[in-house]
Amino acid sequence: MESKTIKKTAVFLIDAENEKREVPRITDEYPDLSVDEAYAIQEELVNIRLGQGYRMVGSKMGLTSHAKKKQMNIDKPIYGYIFDYMVTDANVLHVNELIHPKVEAEIAFILSRDLEGPDVTTEDVLASTEYVVPALEVIDSRFQNFQFTSPDVIADNASSSRVFFGSVMRKPDEMELDLVGVTLSINGELRDLGASAAVLGHPANSVAMLANMLSRQGKKLKAGQIILTGGITGAQLLSLGDIVSAKWDGLGTVEFKVE
Ligand code: OOG
Ligand code: MG
């Protein structure tokens, strides 16, 4: 793909997000779009956001659990980035800012030191983690009907949209991080549940995989960054008026209202 087309496609996706408009898949027009080209579009999109003055606060892994892979019919993990405008302190999701949001329960890591691949291990991640926090990620694919192939969703910054963090912070050695039970409820009704081992056997494996994937692009994970490790359960579609509440064993509760 020519660099002109990469730029044009990144702008197309940014416009869709800004205008809250679902758009056709990139692969409808470019069926041969490769994973590398898709990450090049994502990188362009990230640079446009940085150029607009937004700050990158972290990164995310996606499609790391069986539930998510099955739901989206894609079997390889992907990554994307989280910006400051995606994180809110208030427990409110403004649905009129989004297209067709879904929510998923995750565990997030904050690093105490940089992690640079290749060959980053789970032990390296645990030894470099300042703390873990619970997170509800709101994903909002810019593609019609929330349907896409792997290169499409990579180009679309892994559907990143909003994130709500919990206030409980734990050191990784304070808990069995692969045995964190989580329940996800909407309007008091249990919608899904799981354990954190659903994420690649251990959520720290997801961070290690991300560090190793980034190293192929000469990039690394930086201290202080937030890293979302991926939905433990399938994502749930949200509607106006919903009250979302998730509980993590040992990590408390995160709640928000869809307004
Ligand atoms: C892609 C993003 C997936 C996760 O946690 O698995 C993701 C999507 O499903 O739209 O964030
Ligand atoms: Mg996610």
Image (cartoon, helix red, strand yellow):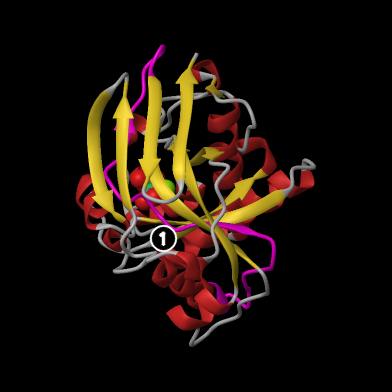
**Where's residue 192, x and y in %?**
23, 38
Residue reaching furthest bottom?
119
In front of the other: 197 or 3 = 197
In front of the other: 77 or 94 = 94
Relative to 191, say whether 28 is above or below.
below
Question: Residue placed at 42% from the left, 64% from the top?
Answer: 175
In front of the other: 255 or 103 = 255
* Residue bearing the label numbered 1: 78
Question: Residue placed at 59% from the left, 37% from the top?
Answer: 14
Relative to 214, say whether 74 is above or below.
above
Helix, strand or loop at mark 1: strand
Is residue 228 in the magenta section? yes
Q: Which residues are magenta?
A: 214-242
Disc 1 under 8 Å from ligand 1? The reply is yes
Question: Residue placed at 55% from the left, 72% from the top?
Answer: 214
The picture quadrant where one finds residue 170 is bottom right
Is residue 172 in the magenta section? no
Amino acid under disc 1: Ile
In the shown orientation, is residue 240 left or right of residue 108? left
Question: Residue placed at 62% from the left, 69% from the top?
Answer: 221
Q: Main secondary structure of the magenta part?
A: loop
| Mark 1 neighbour density, 10 Å: few (under 14) some (14–19) many (20 or more) | many
**Where's residue 67, x and y in %?**
22, 50
